[in-house]
Amino acid sequence: MSSGIAPRRMPGVGTLGRTVCAAATAGSLVACGVVVQQAAPALTVEVARLMMAQGGTITIRQALKLTVTVLAPIALEALIGATGTGGGIVPVRGGTVAAPTRSVDNDWTIVVRRKVGATVQNAGYRVAYAGKVHVITNGRTVQTFEPGKKLITIDATSDTPTTIAVVDSLDQPVRSSGKFRLLVAGGYTDYDFDTDKRSGSRAGTDLHAGLGGPSAAHGARYAKYSGDRKPSLSDCVTVAPDAWSADFGKLDNRGHYCLQTSEGRFGTVGISNTTEYSYTMWQTASTGA
């Protein structure tokens, strides 16, 4: 059976579909997808991330417009000598190595200082972007840099994993938001947050409802948020590298989660029980999970 509910329209917001209820067994079990709202085309926030586990290598996830390259050792050594930033050089995984040539006027240079064992080491990056950038560290510290300052030094010498996000805006443009339910069986077992559609386990979905509880699908990843409030975009783009998982846990999976979809977009999901979900997807552009 199905029924429609006319949603309340908001300025600049369009609705996707209507509320649909599906009976699973002779009307005894009904799952209803609540109206999903999708924002009008808006700013896309570019997100580049530098993720580092304590004592390990640094992993780069580039953005479409914030291209991150690793400074070659000779260029980094010269930079360290010129700025007095002490320490050795730490290995980096991902990205490409920038040739030790002249710097580009529109580029940003980032030096990350961190502990590896008992020593402080440095990693250098070149970010190809001409405008103002914002650097978020672990969701807490936000630094804004105008184009006139081209050298950014980040102190990541704490004993905890660190994620640094470079973004071109501190806005949180909403791509879509809504509430929905999923059935364990039938045609409504999966949800695709990129397209705001429920389905029966089709390719590209991000959340699967099974007998053991919810789980990630097709490479999507989730991270439990420990705070009482719903996490912000800054919280989610700086989740520690070892906090992401496809497992929601077997004992208590209620609460708020950060989400990265199978297509690399960021969002947040709230779970009130094993079938009822609320979510917000932000309009972000990112390459790689």
Image: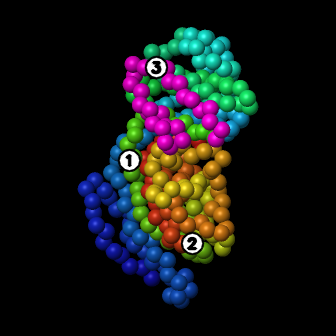
Q: Identify which residue is drawn at 30% across, 72% down.
A: 6
The reply, left or right, for residue 67 in relation to residue 40 is right
The reply, left or right, for residue 213 in relation to residue 37 is right
Q: Which residue is mark 3?
A: 150
Instruction: Name the amino acid type tagged 3.
Output: Lys
Q: CA distance from mark 3 to mark 1?
A: 27 Å
At mark 3, the secondary structure is loop
The reply, left or right, for residue 171 in relation to residue 76 is left
Q: CA distance from mark 1 to mark 2?
A: 28 Å
- Crowding near the residue tagged with mark 1, few <14, some 14–19, many ≥20 C-alpha atoms within 10 Å: some
The C terminus lies in quadrant:
top right
Residue 188, percent from left and from top: 54, 71
Q: Identify which residue is drawn at 55% across, 67% down.
A: 254
- Sequence order check, earlier mark of 3 and 2: 3
At mark 1, the secondary structure is loop
- Crowding near the residue tagged with mark 2, few <14, some 14–19, many ≥20 C-alpha atoms within 10 Å: some
Instruction: Name the amino acid type tagged 1.
Output: Pro
Residue 172 shows in the view: yes
Residue 99 shows in the view: no
Q: CA distance from mark 3 to mark 2?
A: 48 Å
